[in-house]
Every structure is written in structure tokens, then in C-alpha cells.
Amino acid sequence: MSTTITIEQISDLLDQKIYVLKKDLEQSLDEKLEEKLEEKLEQKLEEKLDEKLDEKLDEKLDARLEEKLAPVYQRLDDLDEKFAPIYQRLDNLDERLTKVELTQENKILPAINELTSVYLSTYKIFEKKAEQIDTLVEDVEVLKTVVQEHSEKLKKIS
């Protein structure tokens, strides 16, 4: 038995080993790839399902909320109709108040200012006249006394 192995035989053996390794590697890669794909697919499916569930849940909740709120909206509309005359009256009051303010500012306050100035000037005049009246009263008192004395003297003479 000869134990000599030729290069070709080594090459064939290596090719066989490489082929087996390649097959094993391919199989391993295929398995890993399949696993990863399954994980990704599962993850994507879960995400899509979650999205769809969220959308459906939102739609149902929105519909139920609209259904529940419809009477509230109706009552608000009814209240708006009932309050419309009040709103109109408030608008009218605002207009009237604005007119009153303008009248007060443009007519009444200037008139009050004019009256005040006339009153002050009249007061100063009366103040001077009051002093004169006091003097006149004193003078009249003196005149009365003198006239009484003269009247008594004239009575005595007559």
C-alpha cells in the first residue's frame, strides 16, 4: 500500500471539504436568514396590526364620541338660539354706553367745567360783595343809632 497522496487527490479532498463546508455554511446562512426574515416579518406584521387596530379603535371611539356628544352639541345650538336676543341686547347696550360716554366726554364735562369757572368767578364777586354788605350793615347800625339819638333830641326840642 502506498501512502503517497498526489496533489490532485489533496485538491479533490479539499474541494470536497470546501464543498461540504460551503453547503453547511449556506444551510446555516439560509437558516439564519430565514430566522431573521421571520422575525422582521413578525415585527412588521405586529406593527401593521397595531396601526390598523389603533386606526379602527380611533374610528370607533370617534364615532361613539360623536354619537354621545351629538345631544350636547344640539343643546349648545339651542342655547345659542335662546341667547341670541340677549347677545343682541348686549350689543345694543354697548352701542348706547359708547354714545353715553361720548356725550359725557364731549358735552357734559365741558359744560361742567364752564359752570365751575362761572361759579368760581361768581363766588369771588359774592365774596367781595359780602364784605361790602358787612360794612353796610355796620354803617346802617351806626346810622340807626344816630337817627334814634337825633329823633329823641328832636322830640325833646319840640
Image (spheres, rainbow, N blue to C red):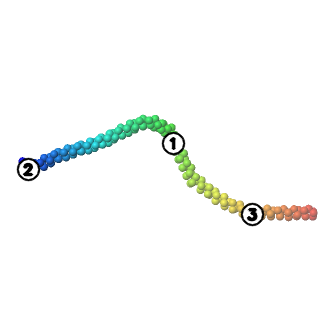
> Which type of secondary structure does the marked residue at label 1 adopt?
helix
What is the crowding at mark 2: few (fewer than 14 residues within 10 Å), some, or many (at least 20)? few
From this viewpoint, is residue 24 visible?
Answer: yes
Q: Which residue is mark 3?
A: 131
The label shown at residue 5 is none
The image shows residue 101, relative to residue 74, as above or below, that is below
Which tag, 3 or 2, sits closer to the chain's start? Answer: 2
- Considering only vertical position in the picture, is 94 above or below 78? below
Please identify, in this view, whether the residue under mark 1 or under mark 2 is nearer the observer.
2
Q: Residue at x 8, y 50 (%)?
A: 3
The Cα–Cα distance between marks 3 and 1, rounded to whole angstroms, is: 62 Å
The x, y position of residue 4, in whole percent, is 7, 51
Distance between mark 1 and mark 2 Cα atoms: 115 Å
Badge 2 amino acid: Thr
Res. 136 image quadrant: bottom right
- Residue 152 lies, in percent from the top left, at 90, 62
Q: Amino acid at mark 1?
A: Tyr
Give the mark nearer the N terminus: 1 vs 2: 2
Point out which mark residue 3 bears.
2
Name the amino acid type tagged 3: Glu
**Position of 153 compared to 21: left or right?**
right
CB-based contact (under 8 Å), mark 1 and mark 2: no
Residue at 88% x, 63% y: name it.
149
Q: Residue furthest left?
A: 1
C-alpha distance separating marks 3 and 2: 161 Å
Residue drawn at point x = 13 percent, y = 46 percent = 16
Of the numbered discs in the image, which one, if any, rests on residue 87? Answer: 1
Residue 11 in view, yes or no: no
First along the sequence among labels 3 and 1: 1
